[in-house]
Image: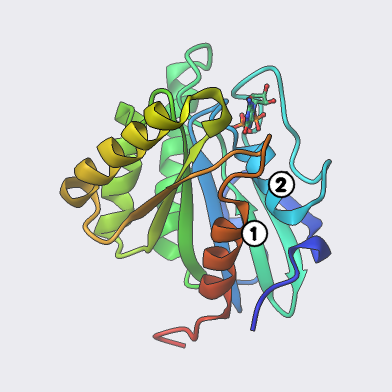
């Protein structure tokens, strides 16, 4: 079975997981540093250009956005992190909301972590991988904007991240991705689809 991502429609936007949609079925969340290319990846995977808002001003998406795929399946756009101009107190609040979401959400099947392939594994990325490992959440890294690197450099970026992953999240996987020239889009879709269709271990 595979998911038709073109069915995705905006469901709701919430400040924290306490008022999220009912925790039933299956969902896959997308996280990343602001400007990593998260909205572009969501729009490309769903083939819905305006689904997630891409922005020239990083750090604007502060809410958790849920997109409905039907049959109790959802994609989740988590707030972008690491934008310097956001006040410290707000960053801490987001961090707390995010950790809470990762801990309590039973329908969460996996997390897609987006990193710009030109500067992956920032402090934030490492933290996120460790949190996901701690809660036993399957995690897959998309090294975005791979069109910006020549082939050799892109594959060095991939190998470099692959080498560091075992120390941060032992089961995490990684691939190259480009919303511009569609590198890795099918591979990413297949993985998200598999997660959304996999049976839940404890429900
Ligand atoms: P977000 O803040 O993580 O949601 O990032 P966006 O999706 O808004 O993208 C941030 C910037 O990177 C925008 O100017 C996008 O046009 C650009 N961008 C995103 N994905 C790609 C890509 O695959 N290739 C290139 N060249 N630019 C991209």
- The span from disc 2 to disc 1 (Cα, nearest Å) is 13 Å
Above/below status of 83 relative to 193:
above
Secondary structure state at the residue bearing disc 2: helix
Location of residue 80 with respect to 185 vertically, above or below: above
Query: Disc 2 designates what residue?
Result: 44
Q: Is residue 9 left or right of residue 197?
A: right
Instruction: Name the residue: 44% across, 64% down.
Output: 104
Answer few, some or many: residues within 10 Å of disc 2's Cα (few below 14, many 20 plus, some between 14 and 19): many
Q: How many marks?
A: 2
State which quadrant residue 190 falls in: bottom right
Disc on res. 124:
none
Q: Is residue 20 visible?
A: no
In-front residue for pair 67/198? 198
Image location (x, y in percent) of residue 41: 64, 43
Q: Quadrant of the N terminus?
A: bottom right
Of all residues shown, which one is farthest toward the left? 167
If you read the primary sequence from the N terminus, does the residue marked by circle 2 or circle 1 appear first?
A: 2
Residue 23 is at least partly visible in this image: yes
Residue 128: % across, % down = 35, 43
Tell which quarter ligand 1 is in: top right
Residue drawn at x 55%, y 57% as measured from the top left: 188
Q: Is mark 2 within 8 Å of ligand 1?
A: yes
> Residue at point 59% right, 33% down?
37
Q: Residue at x 45, y 24 (%)?
A: 82
Residue 75: mark: 1
Q: Where 86 sits versus 190, above or below?
A: above
Q: Between 147 and 63, which is closer to the camera in this rendering?
A: 147
């Amino acid at each position: 079975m595979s998911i038709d991502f073109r069915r995705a429609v905006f469901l709701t936007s919430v400040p924290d997981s306490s008022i999220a949609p009912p925790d039933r079925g299956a969902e896959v969340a997308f996280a990343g540093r602001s400007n990593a290319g998260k909205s572009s990846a969501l729009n490309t995977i769903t083939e819905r250009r305006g689904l997630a808002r891409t922005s020239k001003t990083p750090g604007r998406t502060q809410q958790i956005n849920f997109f409905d795929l039907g049959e109790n399946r959802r994609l989740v756009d988590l707030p972008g992190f690491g934008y310097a101009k956001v006040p410290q107190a707000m960053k801490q609040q987001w961090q707390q909301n995010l950790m809470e979401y990762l801990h309590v959400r039973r329908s969460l099947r996996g997390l897609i972590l987006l990193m710009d392939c030109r500067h992956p594994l920032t402090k934030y990325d490492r933290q996120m991988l460790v949190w996901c490992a701690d809660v036993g959440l399957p995690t897959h890294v998309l090294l975005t904007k791979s069109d910006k690197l020549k082939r050799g450099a892109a594959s060095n970026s991939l190998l470099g991240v692959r080498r560091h992953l075992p120390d941060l999240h032992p089961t995490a996987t990684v691939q190259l991705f480009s919303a511009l020239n569609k590198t890795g889009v099918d591979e990413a879709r297949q993985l998200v689809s598999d997660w959304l269709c996999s049976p839940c271990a404890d429900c």
